[in-house]
Image (spheres, rainbow, N blue to C red):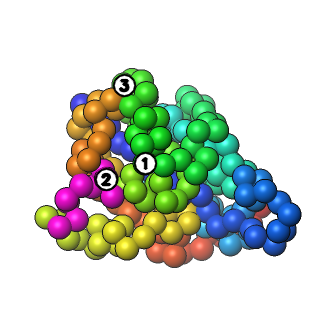
Amino acid sequence: MMRQLLLLRHAKSAWDDPKLPDHSRPLNARGHLAAAAMRELVQTLGLMPDLVLVSSARRTLQTLQALGPLDPSCRVTPLDGLYLATLPQLLETIHGIDDAARRVMIIGHNPGLHELALTLAGGEAMARPDTDLVRLTEGFPTGALAAFALACPWSAVGKGSGRLDRFVAPRDLPEPAGRPT
């Protein structure tokens, strides 16, 4: 039974208020546009998740909001533990996912998401040096989406257990029509 794990880094956030705690930083105008472009991509490719696990940070919640509307059957769970989560914390979260979930999206932060993506790909980047894998090894920019196919249960996700199907950054996409929300 194939599963799909979608890793989405929050879109570009604002840094214009130095007194604002990091957890409370919102998306900036560019971030809103990027999140809207990713929404169009997710919808076009039919990648709407069954379950979304999202960091409780304001910028990740706003990124999620920009993806909407989600399917009414999609469960959304904001988690404080995903805020700046490390690789071990992300793997622990994934291992706790109910196996009934087929397509899961995690909206979070770097460096944890990038480390998780590289771990899932394992040595695949050397064995299959296609453009998406090479780009993934170079970085995981704000607003980027990595889609992995998994042939194992959630509890077994680890090094080399994913096949990278797609890696897309907002700069790869045309800007969506309309203005930032």
Query: Which badge, 1 or 3, is on the more N-terminal residue?
Result: 1
The secondary structure type at the circle numbered 3 is loop
Q: Is residue 54 visible?
A: no
> What amino acid is at disc 2?
Thr
Q: Could you say which is closer to the camera, residue 29 or residue 133?
A: 133
Q: How far across and how far down the image is residue 39, in percent?
A: 57, 56
The secondary structure type at the circle numbered 2 is helix
Whether 23 is among the magenta residues is no
Mark 2 in CB contact with mark 1 (< 8 angstroms): yes
Please state the extent of the stretch shown in magenta in the rendering. 118-126
Looking at the image, residue 176 lies above or below residue 156: below
The secondary structure type at the circle numbered 1 is helix
Q: Which residue is mark 3?
A: 99
Callout 3: few (<14), some (14-19), or many (20+) C-alpha neighbours within 10 Å?
A: few
Residue 119, label in figure: 2
Residue ID at (46%, 54%): 113
Q: Is residue 148 left or right of residue 81?
A: left
Query: Which badge, 3 or 2, is on the more N-terminal residue?
Result: 3
Q: Gap in Å between the C-alphas at discs 3 and 2?
A: 21 Å
Looking at the image, residue 23 lies above or below residue 79: below
Q: Which residue is mark 1?
A: 87
Q: Quadrant of the N terminus?
A: top left
